[in-house]
Amino acid sequence: MPDTLKVLIVEDDPNVRRGCQQALVLEGIVADAVDSAENAWRYIAENPPAVVISDIRLPGMDGMALMARIRAFDADLPVVLMTGHGDISLAVQAMKDGAHDFIEKPFSSTHLVEIARRALETRRLVQEVRDLRAQINSGQNLETRIIGKSPQIQMVRRRIIDLGQASADVLITGETGTGKELVAQCLHDLSPRRAGNFVALNCGGMPENLIDSEIFGHEVGAFTGAAKRRIGKIEHANGGTLFLDEIESMPMPMQIKLLRVLQERKIERLGSNQVLEVNCRVIAASKSDLRELSDQGRFRADLYYRLNVATLRLPPLRERRDDIGLLFEHFAHQAAARYGRPAPRLDSEKLQALMACEWPGNVRELKNAADRWVLGDIEGFPLDDPDGDNRRSLTETLEVFERRLISEALRRNGMSLSRAAEDLKMAKTTLHDRIRKYKLSGR
């Protein structure tokens, strides 16, 4: 449903049609008008309004037939019928058939506006209920795609649901392997654009001499070897979502062109002077700090601010260690099904070993480890300890875990003891003792 609620007026008399539209617009209600039920249906199919106000007596298909078609398309879309004095019986029947209201000609502008506002409010409430149901269903579905029970990953799922229905562009940040493309796909699937294409483009994986053609497309003869027209990624994403992965690696000249597209939502294929309007949501992803890169002159600041409308940070695996066992078992069962192998049992000692690892490659590295574990390829792997000689005790494992948590908190907070203690929700004196114990540094 569009952000602005719109009324569609269907009236064959040009004076009445123009008068109704002006009356609504003067009261701040967005309104379009058409002269027949056939034109109304084409309009509704392409750009559904929030309310339809239609005359009953129309050339060709009449208002009653139009209402029946609308109710089959969307039973909750309010239809108000305008009637002449002799059409009251029809209006009563229409109300029985599901019309939202009717208004008898001649009517005042004030009366028309009141009825339109009541119908718009009904539509708004219906949409709120639909959105709430969609969010509930989305949250349930997300748990099978974005796996984990840690507070960090629960926040990510809530953020995906919140941003899914929004029309704003999104910047996803996170280290390599944290699942940025999966999150972008979820944002698309939960958005009103889900019926459109999800087009992914790795900005660091294209030769510079092909970037323009890949992104904007080209016409026949645009350059040597251009034997046929090519639709670019942006145009292919029209009506859907364009995902720009590793945006930080995009060459500076292309950043300038992308900025213009984001501002104007228009493109030109190479070798063409025709301007094409595009309506796609842009989701960019970066493993680097774009603000820092822009300060260094390695990324355009204006593009950074244009992309940084809504942000979603994905935590590294070391910040959500509670999810490691759940993720590993999920990937192991997937691998077992894929390779036709049984999934080995993950006991508590092996789980401790997994949780003690740093996982610099994050979820991607963990998935690779689960595949190797199922296939029996465990050389140099955290679980490779058949004799148990190198296994840590529970106390030792917890100390390793605690040391890493404190070290990460200090790093996040610029080595400040006070801020790290607040971050970890522990007393400064306790943190100071732990820092001395583990021979860490803080100030």
Image (spheres, helix red, strand yellow):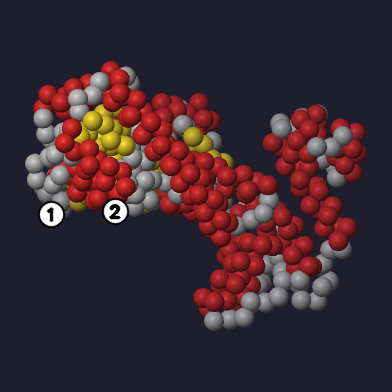
Using the numbered discs, state the Cα–Cα distance from disc 2 to disc 1 in whole angstroms: 46 Å
Q: Dot 2, crowdedness within 10 Å: few (<14), some or many (≥20)?
A: few
- Image coordinates for residue 282, horizontal then vertical, percent: 38, 40
User: Does residue 28 appear to the left or right of 274 in the view shown?
Assistant: right
| Helix, strand or loop for disc 2 | helix
- Image coordinates for residue 389, horizontal then vertical, percent: 83, 71
Q: Dividing the image into 4 quarters, which one contains the N terminus?
A: top left
Say which of 127 and 173 sits in front: 127
Look at label 2 and name its amino acid: Ala
Which residue lies under the disc numbered 1? 227
- Image coordinates for residue 184, horizontal then vertical, percent: 46, 48
| Helix, strand or loop for disc 1 | loop
Say which of 78 and 108 sits in front: 108
Which residue lies under the disc numbered 2? 72
Dots 2 and 1: beta carbons under 8 Å?
no
Look at label 1 and name its amino acid: Ala
- Image coordinates for residue 310, horizontal then vertical, percent: 49, 34
Q: Nearer the viewer, mark 2 or mark 1?
A: 2
Q: Earlier in the sequence, mark 2 or mark 1?
A: 2
Asked whether the viewer can see residue 198, the reply is yes
What numbered label is drawn on residue 74?
none
Report the residue at 13% width, 54% height from top.
228
Q: Is residue 342 above or below residue 183?
A: below
User: Does residue 212 appear to the left or right of 299 in the view shown?
Assistant: left
Report the residue at 47% width, 40% height from top.
128
Q: Is residue 251 above or below residue 98?
A: above
Q: Dot 1, crowdedness within 10 Å: few (<14), some or many (≥20)?
A: few
Asked whether the viewer can see residue 48, the reply is no
User: Does residue 303 appear to the left or right of 108 in the view shown?
Assistant: right
Report the residue at 36% width, 28% height from top.
117
